[in-house]
Image (cartoon, rainbow, N blue to C red):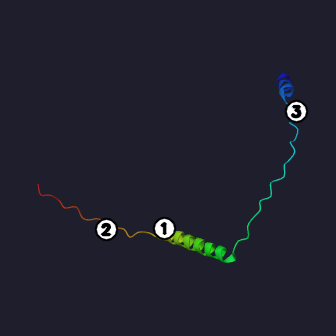
Amino acid sequence: MAGIEGILLTAQPPEPEKPVEPEPVIEEEPVDAQVVAEAISEADAIVKQGEEAIIEALKPKPEKPEKPKKEEPV
């Protein structure tokens, strides 16, 4: 039981909660829908290229037939 008493005596009370500060409001400028559409289109093209590269990399490669070793005359 002495071990439990030692733990209880060394326990510290919880720290008081700090007040939560509200996050600052960020003013956003209006964005042109055409600019957003172009950016999404470019991002889609990049993703498609990446997907195609991954698919190509995962395709099994044809195995090269091993060349028969030439036996040297003794």
Q: Would you name the residue on which mark 2 appears?
A: 65
Most distant residue in the left direction: 74
Q: Residues within 10 Å of mark 1 (few under 14, many from 20)?
A: few
Left or right: residue 17 compared with residue 30: right
Residue displayed at 66% across by 77% down: 34
Residue 64 location (% of width, % of height): 33, 68
The answer for how far apart the CA atoms under marks 2 and 3 are is 74 Å
Residue displayed at 47% across by 67% down: 57
- Is residue 9 or residue 21 the one in the foreground? 21
| Disc 3 element | loop
| Disc 2 element | loop
Residue 1 location (% of width, % of height): 86, 24
Residue 66 location (% of width, % of height): 29, 65
Q: Would you name the residue on which mark 3 appears?
A: 13
Does label 2 or label 3 sit earlier along the sequence? 3
- The mark lying in front, picked from 1 and 2, is 1
The answer for how far apart the CA atoms under marks 3 and 1 are is 57 Å
Q: Which quadrant of the view contains residue 38?
A: bottom right
Q: Amino acid at mark 1?
A: Leu
- Is residue 61 or residue 27 the one in the foreground? 27
Pointers 2 and 3 in contact (C-beta within 8 Å): no
Does label 3 or label 1 sit earlier along the sequence? 3
Q: Residues within 10 Å of mark 2 (few under 14, many from 20)?
A: few
Does label 1 or label 2 sit earlier along the sequence? 1
Q: Would you name the residue on which mark 1 appears?
A: 58
Left or right: residue 29 compared with residue 52: right
Q: Which quadrant of the view contains residue 74?
A: bottom left
Q: Amino acid at mark 2?
A: Pro
Pointers 1 and 2 in contact (C-beta within 8 Å): no
